[in-house]
Amino acid sequence: MYTEETLSEDCDNGTMPDNVDALRDAVVGHRIVSVTTDKEGRWGANRAVITLDNGKRVTLSDTGDCCAYTELNSFLLHPDKVDHIITGVGTTGEYTTWHIYADMGDVLELSVGWSPGNPFYYGYGFEIRVSEIA
C-alpha cells in the first residue's frame, strides 16, 4: 500500500527500516483492541501501548541519546477500521508518519520525530517490546 522509503546512508544506518520491520512483525495479522500513551521510567519517556486481539501488547518507547532521538509526537486511531485485520506497516515523509493499515486503509497513524544526531555515534530508534497481557 505504501512504497518503501529509502534514506541516504548519511541520514540513517538502517535503524528506522529495522524499527518498521519490528513493528510489522508484531502487528500484521491481528486487530488493534486499544492504543494508549503514558510515561515510563525516571525521566518520563513517552510510550505508546498497542493492545492486540491475540492477547499481546506492543510497546513503542521513545529513545534519546544526546542529540539523537526517536519520539512519538501523536497518533490517530481510525475506530471505523479497527475491526479489520492489519495487513502492513508503511511510512511516508522520510519515516515521520507511520501507517498501520488494513485492506480498508489506515487503522493507526503515528507521527514520529527522529534524528540520528551525529551519525552514527549515538543511538536512536524506538525501543519496541512485545509482551503478554497480564
Image (spheres, grey):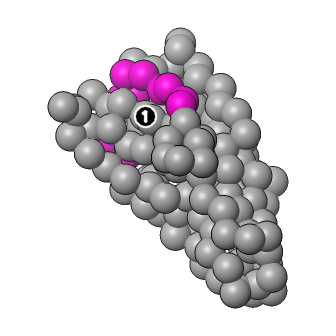
How far across and down, in percent of the image, does residue 53 sit? 27, 28
| Residue at x 67% of width, y 69% of height | 65
Q: Give the quadrant of residue 133.
A: top left
Q: Is residue 62 above or below residue 19?
A: above
How far across and down, in percent of the image, does residue 45 sit? 59, 46
Considering depth in this image, is 5 or 45 the residue closer to the camera?
45
How far across and down, in percent of the image, does residue 1 sit? 60, 47
Q: In this view, does 113 lie above or below 102?
A: below
- 117 left or right of 30 in image: right
- Would you name the residue on which mark 1 appears? 50
Considering depth in this image, is 115 or 95 the residue closer to the camera?
115
- 131 left or right of 71 in image: left
Q: Give the quadrant of residue 25.
A: bottom left
Q: Does the rendering let one see residue 1?
A: no
Considering depth in this image, is 62 or 98 the residue closer to the camera?
62
| Residue at x 73% of width, y 39% of height | 73
| Residue at x 68% of width, y 50% of height | 71
The C terminus: image quadrant: top left
Q: How many marks overall? A: 1
Instruction: Return the residue found at the far top.
Output: 80
Q: SS at mark 1? A: strand
Residue bounds of the magenta highlight: 26-38
> Is-magenta flag for residue 35?
yes
- 30 left or right of 22 in image: left
Disc 1 marks a residue whose amino acid type is Ile
Q: Does the rendering let one see residue 61?
A: yes
